[in-house]
Amino acid sequence: MKPDSPVLRGEPDVGDAPSGPGQAPAPPGQAPAFPGRGRRRIAALVGAGPVGSRLASVFLAVVVLCAILAPLAAPYRPDAIDFAVSLSPATPEHLLGADQSGRDLLSRVMYGARTSLIGPLVLLAVASVVGVAIGTLAAWSRGWVDAVLSRVTDVMYAFPGLLFVVLVVAVFGNGMTTAVLALGLAYAPTIAKYTRSIAITECAKPYIDAYRVQGMGSLAICVRHLIPNLARSLVGYLVVLFGEGLMSLATLSFLGFGAQPPSSDWGLMVKEGQAAIVQGAFLPVLVPGAAIALVVVSFNVIGVRLADRLGTRRL
Amino acid sequence: MALRVARKLAGLVATLLATSFIIFGAAYAAPGDPVTFLAGGKENLTPEYLAAVRAQYHLDDPFSVQYGRWLWDALNGDLGRSFQYNDEVLDLLAARLPTTLGLVAYATVLFVVIGVALGVLAAVRGGRTDSTVVAGTTFATSVPPFVAATALISVFGVQLGWFPVAGGGSFTHLTLPAITLALGAVAIISRVTRQAMVEQRELDHVTVARASGLAERLIVVRHVFRGALGPVVTMCGLVSAGMLAGTVTVETVFGLSGIGSLLVGAINTHDFPVTQAVLLLMVVAYITVTTLVELAQPLIDPRARIERSRA
């Protein structure tokens, strides 16, 4: 048993989720009408639901807006140094205070939202492309291909925590690009395992055989029909992974392996603000730290809710 | 049974070989000449130095021979010399391992006691206690250890002054780091405990015990908790095995000189022999402990014996 298996305990439930697009064999030649419906469903989720997930969605929307509008909305440049206000507490000029070099923390955290959100996005894109490809290949071909791929992913699992990423960083050097790509590779086995488990149930459904009988190639069935039908379950999973990815990436930046100064990545901000704690100034650490924690909590809350609603988890 | 153990051990050896191969081969994946990479930087590239590195890594031999020698040396305790500290890697590890192991042991005690207690409490009390524990653990898993650590330092180290802010050596120095390390683990363990207890409670033999008038406390201790013990113990083992990797962040935040901070320092100074050795140690410990936990499962949970032998 691997530590992650409790997370995946709900796997067998995936297949018999109600109202799945793949449930009724789709009429040949007509792609399941997933994308449009899915988007509306996600929009409905954001509006409805318990207070927790609604708050989380609003908060994330604000963070994303801050990231996009940072150049317009931020009161200062993120790298504007002003030693006169070094370690300033919250004042009307600096709403969230300033760090050791007198850089405005509000502006830095707003600009930092850009790297801190785009990083996990790219890493998940890398991880899902690799992971979904491997998982689908394993589930589709079974036999020795499946066995070999499972062994390979098992070896990746043998590295606890972030150690695989740390090894990659040690070899290829520090930096955001290396960190993001390495984390993407490190997350791929998790996604591959999950994809494989849901793809196996999906492959057993009659519509797959129906396409095969029509003479459609394996690749076409997988890309055009199988994977779109898996997307529904994968989205909920990816939302939770996004929070985790943000956390891992921030940790790498904190250790000095990811974003490098003068970036205002949140992990790096905590690292740089740490020295000020001893001087009694908590804001330089508190602001980015709270930003990380709140964003991750929000993603987890929404992820769980999505998973519930999309039938990935039984209610 | 013997066959199962043998198969598990064979799998253990195969995984160990594969991971050691990755850790060794990583040096060759680096761009440029491996000598330059292994020597750790451009400034110390005298010809004698390069020759020494070449000799230490047997770089003139074929790749497979190099790997074999490296593995053989590692098994015999020769992990090479650190370029940064100019010292045997093994001595560096030996000097720093006690801190790390103490930290992990301290954190393990904390997360087992608190995690199981919270899980049992949530399952038995239900209602508001349950939802509080679930909400609390959800939040705890969302806070990265380095953020939790800085928060703990701010509150208990600086403002209240209860614990030293950084440095190591004593029990009080290890308290805040151990709490940080245990935080995520408490969340996992309490969830697993709660889930296992809730599942056990629904079973027929518990209903029978309740119907025959057994005191609720005894039902919980003897039947529900006993039945839930299997997954809980397994999870505790797996989590504490993974903690060795967790020390990388925690030791860095608190400035403890254990093997976790040694690894971070080694990477930032391009000290590859040390990086390799620490990674190897952490991965070997992790794989070995997780395999042992899996092997021990039937000893804790008699049901696992029956299921396994049927399968």
Image (tube, rainbow, N blue to C red):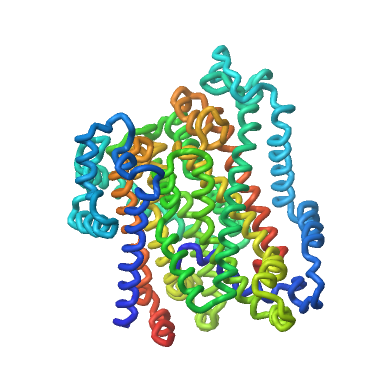
Q: Residue at x 68, y 53 (%)?
A: A302
Against B141, residue B290 (above or below) is below
Q: Residue at x 23, y 54 (%)?
A: B61
Q: Quadrant of the C terminus of chain B?
A: bottom left
Nearer-the-camera pick, A8 or A281: A8
Q: Position of residue B236 (x, y in %)?
A: 41, 61
Q: Residue at x 59, y 32 (%)?
A: A287
Q: Quadrant of residue B113?
A: bottom left
Does residue B258 appear in this view? no
Q: Quadrant of the N terminus of chain B?
A: bottom left
In the drawing, does residue B227 fall left or right of residue B143?
left
In the drawing, does residue A280 fall left or right of residue A103?
left
Q: Position of residue A117 (x, y in %)?
A: 63, 42
Q: Position of residue B94 (x, y in %)?
A: 22, 46
Nearer-the-camera pick, A303 or B77: B77
Q: Residue at x 39, y 32 (%)?
A: B165
